[in-house]
Image (cartoon, rainbow, N blue to C red):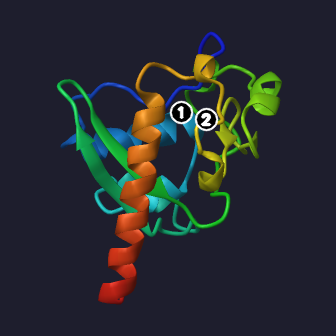
Amino acid sequence: VAAGRLATVGGKREGEDADSRATAIREVFEESGMLDICRAHGAPPDLRKLAAKAPEPPIFRLFAYGSEVDWWVLLVRGRGVFQEEAKDRCKCADVRELLPRLPGASPAEAFGHVWVPVKAFTGAVHPELLMPGVMRRVKEAVFALINANQTNETDGS
């Protein structure tokens, strides 16, 4: 969250990142402390080892390309497993005051992050809380998850 706006996890590719998948994995881990992401296909061995007891996410897929950003969607089991302190916690704000304006939201285990049930994203979120285009990307991510989940169910994975 930045200046009263809901923000996605993001960042720039660094030298050690093999591709946008590696960048997404690293940034989610650094900003949230989520260990589940460290078990995703393509995670570096050091992160995979750190997260040995976290569940592997059932879905982590690229769903959109941008001129300077790729958009990834992640489905976790339950509420996720987190380290106690995220590396980049200082970049996050306290989101508790925003909770009444996010239908069904609850604080996530990672400071500055919230869980919002997918079914709550019906456009009822106050637009001033969102960066331009984020609601569209959230809806695209929801559709990508639904499609990926249906594919996993039909192919037995």
Residue at image location 48% in from the left, 33% down from the top = 135
- Numbered disc 1: secondary structure: helix
**Residue 41, percent across and down?**
32, 63
Task: Give the Cα separation between the discs numbered 1 and 2.
Answer: 6 Å
Image position of 143 (left or right of 121) = left
Any part of residue 143 in sight: yes
**Residue 96: % across, % down:** 81, 28
Asked which quadrant contains residue 148, the reply is: bottom left
Q: Is residue 82 above or below residue 92?
A: below
Would you call the spot at circle 1 few (<14 residues within 10 Å), some (14-19), or many (20 or more)? many
Choose between 85 and 107: the one closer to the eye. Answer: 107
Taking depth in this image into account, of 41 and 45 the one nearest to the observer is: 41
Choose between 78 and 55: the one closer to the eye.
78
Q: Quadrant of the C terminus?
A: bottom left
Which residue is label 2 attached to?
A: 86
**Percent of width and height locating residue 34:** 57, 48
- Across and down, in percent, residue 49 comes to 45, 61
- Image marks 1 and 2: residues in contact by CB distance under 8 Å: yes
Which residue was labeled with disc 1? 31
Residue furthest to the front in view is 123
| Quadrant in which the N terminus appears | top right
* Crowding at mark 2 (Cα within 10 Å: few <14, some 14-19, many 20+): some
Q: Residue at x 44, y 19 (%)?
A: 132
Residue at (47% x, 68% y) in the render: 56
The amino acid marked with disc number 2 is Ala
Does residue 157 appear in the picture of this structure? no
